[in-house]
Amino acid sequence: MVKTITRTMKAPEERKKWDEKYDVKTVSAKLSPIEFTNFKTHCETKGITPSAQIKELIKNEMKSPLPINLAGKNLFIYNKFKDNFSWRVMLDNGLRVDVEDDLSPDYVLQLSEEIKKAVDERNTYLKKENGGVPIPSKLVRKGL
């Protein structure tokens, strides 16, 4: 299948001339044969070419990109009727992200214990005691 795709593509020199003529750049991605087939079928179902779909996806991402770092708070909500938990994240910008809606009590308990162990290890490493916060070691060297 890859050989068929390669034969139908323009030669690199031909593609370069076309890109220069129309002042555009080419974007590509490597997909497994199954991913390629699924993507091509998806595009055919939508009635557009793979190139047009890729272009649309890139434009949409550039128009409203997701920030790399987000801030927010985790919320765990207990559902007494189902005896399970939902995990939500309330972002500082007001949006809510539903992480999971069906967490067992055992899972949440084990997760809680692991988080506590990791935080305790961090506090020991930072030598935090009595609610102190990390301070730059440069200040310690100056006699604080």
Image (tube, helix red, strand yellow):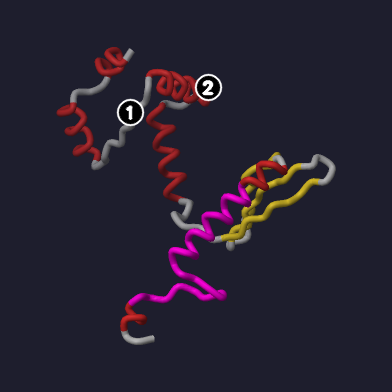
Label 1 secondary element: loop
Label 2 secondary element: helix
Residue 40 falls in which quadrant of the image? top left
114 lies above or below 25 = below
Residue 78 appears at what percent x and percent y? 76, 49
Residue that mark 1 sits on:
30
Residue 19 appears at what percent x and percent y? 22, 36
Residue at the image position 35 percent from the left and 81 percent from the top? 139
Please state, as top left, top right, bottom left or bottom right, where the N terminus lies in the image. Answer: top left
Q: Amino acid at mark 1?
A: Lys
Task: Tell me which numbered mark, 1 or 2, is placed earlier along the sequence.
Answer: 1
Residue 14 lies in the magenta stretch: no
Q: Residues within 10 Å of mark 1 (few under 14, many from 20)?
A: few
Secondary structure mostly seen in magenta is helix
Magenta residues (range): 111-137
Residue 38 appears at what percent x and percent y? 47, 21
69 lies above or below 99 = below
Residue that mark 2 sits on:
45
Residue 142 appears at what percent x and percent y? 32, 85
Left or right: 84, with 26 as reference point: right
Please state, as top left, top right, bottom left or bottom right, where the C terminus lies in the image. Answer: bottom left
Left or right: 106, with 44 as reference point: right
Residue at the image position 41 percent from the left and 42 percent from the top? 58
Nearest to viewer (mark 1 / mark 2): 1
